[in-house]
Image (cartoon, rainbow, N blue to C red):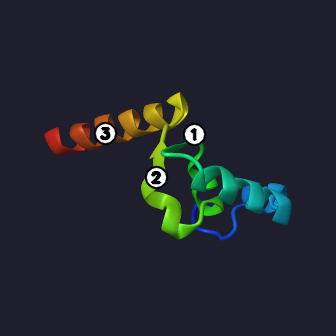
Amino acid sequence: MALISFPTFNAFRVYSKSIESMMKWGIESSDVVIIDHLEMMEMIPAKMVPKVIYHSHNAEFKLGKILLNSSLTQLKN
């Protein structure tokens, strides 16, 4: 549910103008930005998204693997 609501609870909880300005400064002065939580994408300004590399957690990888295996099982039946 958090991925379809805006802002997500985590972004709402940690948001402040000072964090926003620090993030913009850090992103502008960097070649690449690595985020490890999908919910943090909304904290990155849209014009800076091409610099972002998303690194998912193992839990998200495992969920994807489970869904893939589930889909393959359904296709076999």
Identify the amino acid type marked 2. Lys
In this rendering, is residue 33 above or below 20? above
Identify the amino acid type marked 3. Leu
The quarter of the image holding the C terminus is: top left
**Front label number (3 vs 2):** 2
Q: Earlier in the sequence, mark 1 or mark 2?
A: 1
Residue shown at 22% from the left, 39% from the top: 72
How packed mark 3 is, by other alpha carbons closer than 10 Å (few <14, some 14-19, many 20 or more), is few
* Tag 1 residue: 36
Q: Is residue 71 left or right of residue 76?
A: right
Residue shown at 57% from the left, 57% from the top: 41
* Tag 3 residue: 68
Can you tell which mark lies on residue 51?
2
User: Which element carries disc 2, helix, strand or loop?
Assistant: helix
Q: Is residue 22 left or right of residue 44?
A: right
Can you tell which mark lies on residue 5?
none
Identify the amino acid type marked 1. Asp
- Asked if the residues shown at circle 1 and circle 2 are in contact, with their CB atoms under 8 angstroms apart, the answer is no
* Residue 18: % across, % down: 84, 60
User: In the orientation shown, which residue stands out farthest toward the left?
Assistant: 76
Confirm whether residue 9 shows in the render. no
